[in-house]
Image (cartoon, grey):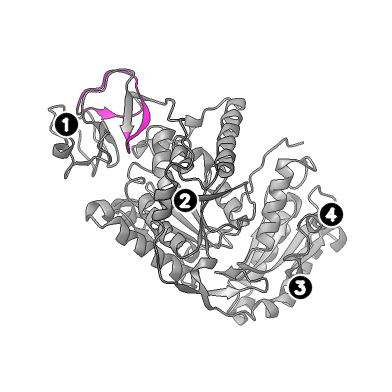
Amino acid sequence: MHADRSGPAAIILHEADNVAILRERVAGGGDPLGFGRPLPQPLSAGHKIALRPIPHGASILKFGQIIGTAKMDIAAGEHVHTHNCAFSEHDRAYTIGDDLARAAAAIPDIAPRHFAGYRRADGRIGTRNFIALCATVNCSATVIRRAAFELETSGVLANYPNVDGIVAFAHGSGCGMASEGRGFDILQRVLWGHATHPNVGAAVFVGLGCEVMQIARMKSVFGAAGADHFHGLTIQDSGGTRQTIAAIKAKVLEILPAVNEVHREPVPVSALKVALQCGGSDGLSGITANPALGAACDLLVGLGATVILSETPEIYGAEQLLLRRAVNQQVADRLIACLGWWERYTAMNGGSMDNNPSPGNKAGGLTTILEKSLGAVAKGGSTPLTAFYDYAEQVTAPGLVFMDTPGYDPVSATGQIAGGAQIVVFTTGRGSAFGSKPAPTVKLATNDALFASMPEDMDLNCGDVLSESVPLSDKGLQILELLLAVASGAQSKSEALGLGDNEFVPWQVGAVM
């Protein structure tokens, strides 16, 4: 049956599946699989059709994995979605490391590649060269934003062609919080990670003066590493708002010549850390852009680079695919414990892990978090899971690694960038206007229609994996070449639009007091 039903109308992803995925939009009254059951309403590409009768209570399978349970009897040819598919338990019979040998064999043997990057004094490599203004507390958010705006619009940067811009990292915390604990540690790591990021040539910390988050304490925690290229001042010591804006601008003008002295040079791809993101996902995300990005990640790992998979709520239900290729029990145990924390966290707040997918995801054909996760995890490719990191922790291991973050894109990417990612790659099926600084974002469309409708936002179309049968390996190579071009200074679509100033959103954990 499967071979007969997979074709121009739909695709079957695994021989065990009892649903097929629509390749393109179907009008109401259509019978895409020829079961004699006309659809009562039009359906977009990415939605699911039952391949055979699915009894009430039976598992619904996609990718060969459980994505939910039938709420009622489902007939062959019937639309399968939220009205008849319920969230359910998933495979928790974790077999740690069972697929490790196969994952290790998936690392390709590739001749070394290079890109044009900025070599920093500590040996790290930048893909951009920004001056960062970092607020230690929300009280100093306005002064750094205004100083950055006045400097950017003054025309002074035209004299410094090697400086990519001045970015203000403002946020809503820094005080009214505990002076110790996970929430404090996270914000401290985020601020330090951005100020000392390889894409930042110099940074100015700006505080009010009396806040919980103090610059001196950060220095004592993190040591001298990276501290030689940042400066600090407070509003209280500078004489108020206007005086502080003037002081920030004076400091930036003072350090601009030194920041401009760096030049791009050939550097190995092994120096790259690439953050993986998906947002506005649809039913084609796990078929086109995500596995294509996974193919690119395998190439990056073969070149010695690091790829950072995150968004913990969006691997829920697919974690077994990562655990089977964890390099050791410690990495696996940390990931399992992290997922347990998320289950308790959502329950404590009256939610469920199935609160994700979003309404847009569901309109695009994704029914449960189990289904969404199985597609999302494909972004990471096929190689071993080499390390686990807490949010905004400095990433040091090469290969495929995992960082605990929320699924909310700005918060997740903020943590990955703080951990050292110099470039972000973002897949989307519904559309996205995401951008980031100081690490540029590259966006991949999962379908032809999105690429055509948002041409100024999408960097590359992956819809042709389905519409034109472009092999995933070929698309992965296209993605790799695009990432190396952007890492070398080519402007991404989000950079051309000026995005990224408002996507710095540190994860707030803990009581606001």
Q: Amino acid at mark 2?
A: Pro
Q: Residue 69, percent across and down? A: 36, 24
Marks 2 and 1, how far apart at CA: 46 Å
Asked whether 382 or 38 is in front, the reply is: 382
Upstream in sequence: badge 2 or badge 1: 1
Q: Which residue is mark 1?
A: 29
Q: Quadrant of residue 66?
A: top left
Q: Is residue 75 magenta?
A: yes
Q: Is residue 295 above or below residue 154?
A: above
Element at badge 1?
loop
Estimate how packed mark 1 is, as few (under 14), some (14 to 19) or many (20 or more) residues with alpha carbons within 10 Å: few
Q: Is residue 342 above or below residue 290?
A: above
Q: Amino acid at mark 3?
A: Ala
Q: Which residue is mark 2?
A: 384
- Residue 446 visible? The answer is yes
Q: Amino acid at mark 4?
A: Gly
Upstream in sequence: badge 1 or badge 3: 1
